[in-house]
Amino acid sequence: MNAPPLLSLRDLAVVFHRDRRRIRALRGLDLVLAAGERLALLGESGSGKSTALLAIAGLLGPEAERSGEILFPLLGRAPILGRDVGFVFQDPFSALDPVLDVATQIAEPIRFHRGASWSAARAEAVALLRRVGIEPAEKRARDAPHRFSGGERQRIAIAMAIAAEPRLLLADEPTSALDTVNQAQILDLLDGLVRARDTALLLVTHDPAVAARIADRIAVLYAGRCVEVGPSARVLGAPRHPYTRALLAAALSLDRPPPRPLPEIPGSPPDPERDIAGCPFAPRCPLAASRCRTTPPPRTGGPEDGVACHLYAP
């Protein structure tokens, strides 16, 4: 008998209310994540990736209206942020307290969620610093966050997120502010940590290369909807949805000179304040037919492996 998924999103929708405006950030997201699995949410800025992570973590502000279901079937209860779900934010400096030394900040979730003594929690915090590559760990544990580089701060933020040994780690563009060398190191660190602890990872990125490096599966988001999801090798090697193809075609590679002119996806994403009658990608899609502009595309497959496109409708 198959184990239930760790995380299940069913028709998840989020609307932000701002100055009498209704901004639709998510428009019915269906996804599943198994224990120990690594899933990347891939898409342009504004596709709803970060909003999905905030909704899962329960960190949406009072201006957000959420509908649909966020379930943790394997836990059998609502998750506890910090204990069951860890969060690695895009900007590590804003996630760290500028006053406290880094060992104290890592030790706090160990004490609070795992009931360890202060001395035991601090000793484990030093061990975590060493594990994420901060050396000499005993000495630097007493330093404040401003004494670390951007890459080191992100390592410390990861140590904080995994300190209570969560079942799920949410990572929101954890390498976007780093140089190429630090990006690779942070991704390898995340990969090693989640594998060693059998922790599920939900990673937000706009870079297909990042998704390819770390994810078992990739979900492609566009205008708040999942347009394609499946194993990473299949999504990147044989993409089905026209948006996925366009997104991969527009990605540049360091292995070869950039083409001229630079590839782009023509047009703009739909206005998040407006309803969408048909496929949200239809105005930009070279394969769009009349039904694409008037009828929502059906999903072929399921939340683990599927595509929402009229080209694959029965």
Image (tube, rainbow, N blue to C red):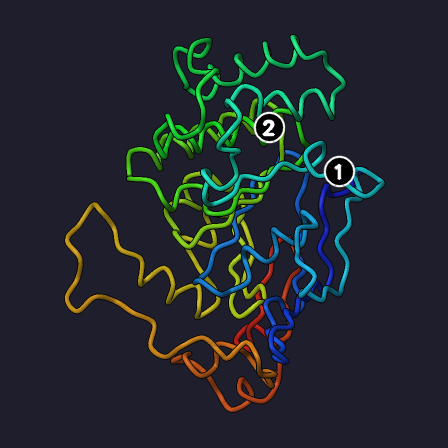
Residue to which mark 1 is pinned: 80
Look at 76% across and 40% down and name the residue there.
79
Measured as percent of width and height from the top left, residue 128 is found at 53, 17
Viewed as shown, does residue 217 lie left or right of 1?
left
Which residue ends up furthest to the front in the rendered image? 99
Instruction: In this rendered view, identify the residue nearer to me: 307 or 21.
Output: 21
- Characterize the local packing of mark 2: few (<14), some (14-19) or many (20 or more) Cα atoms within 10 angstroms: many
105 lies above or below 31: above
108 lies above or below 93: above
The Cα–Cα distance between marks 2 and 1, rounded to whole angstroms, is 13 Å
150 lies above or below 119: below
The image quadrant of residue 163 is top right
Is the residue under label 1 in contact with that under label 2 (CB below 8 Å)?
no
Query: The C terminus lies in which quarter of the figure?
Result: bottom right
Measured as percent of width and height from the top left, residue 8 is found at 72, 51
**Amino acid under disc 1:** Ile
Look at 40% across and 41% down and name the residue there.
175
**The residue tagged with tag 1: helix, strand or loop?**
loop
Look at 25% across and 67% down and name the residue there.
263
Viewed as shown, does residue 139 lie left or right of 30?
left
**Amino acid under disc 2:** Ile
Q: Which mark is residue 162?
A: 2
Measured as percent of width and height from the top left, residue 84 is found at 72, 34
Query: The N terminus lies in which quarter of the figure?
Result: top right
Look at 48% across and 65% down and name the residue there.
46
